Amino acid sequence: MNSPAVDLVMLVDDNDTDNFISKRIIELTKFAKRIEIKNSGKSALQYLEANQNNPDLLPDLIFLDINMPIVDGFVFLFEFSRFPDTIRNKTKVVVLSSSDNKRDIEKIVNYGNVIKFVTKPLTDEVLKGIRIVLAQ
């Protein structure tokens, strides 16, 4: 597929290496036109709040790490669930984690905006699967 699946993707991970790898695979596969990188759940929430009235700056998809200091993925998802419908209807979340803890996965899939749980690293195959989910 040559056309981008999404306009804007946000990577939320405190690990710069993981963000770099994810960004490169998204660029190489032309999965998204634009990529916004946030190094913490807190900065991602602040970005969403600051841009909630500007749909062009809201991500279509967020790749979210679970294990981050201060505002981890669970806190992020809880806070995200409290955002207005305009944000929650536009933005879907894919949890991208090194954790394969079954309890974590079960907790995560109960959030309505989470469309998929994948383990790092992001790959072409994973992105193909996400394209299919987004197209449904």
Image (cartoon, helix red, strand yellow):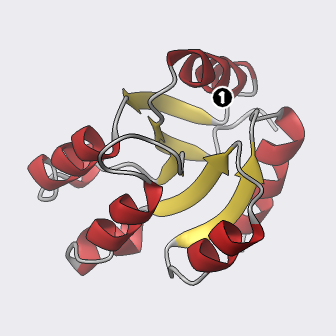
Give the residue drawn at x 39%, y 48%.
Answer: 59
Residue 95 versus residue 29: which sits nearer the camera? Answer: 95
Tally the numbered discs.
1
Residue 30 in the image: above or below residue 55: above
Q: Is mark 1 on a helix, strand or loop?
A: helix
**Residue type, numbered disc 1:** Ile
Q: Which residue is drawn at 69% across and 69% down?
A: 105
The residue indicated by pointer 1 is: 26
State left or right for residue 122 relative to residue 39.
right
Residue 85 shows up from this direction: yes
Q: Position of residue 41 (x, y in %)?
A: 33, 45
Q: In this view, does 81 lie to the left or right of 45?
A: right
Percent position (x, y) of residue 122? 74, 35
| For residue 20, above or below residue 108 | above
Q: Is residue 134 visible?
A: no
Q: Which of 80 and 86 is in front in this view?
A: 80
Above or below, 56 against 114 in this view is above
- Quarter occupied by the N terminus: top right
- Image quadrant where one finds the C terminus: bottom right
Task: Identify which residue is drawn at 48% across, 42% down.
Answer: 7
Mark 1 nearby-residue class (10 Å; few <14, some 14–19, many ≥20): many
Residue 129, by quadrant, is: bottom right
Residue 31 in percent (x, y) is at: 66, 36
Name the residue at 67% across, 19% down: 21
Looking at the image, residue 9 sits to the left or right of residue 50; the answer is right
Along the line of sight, which residue is nearer the eye, 23 or 27? 23
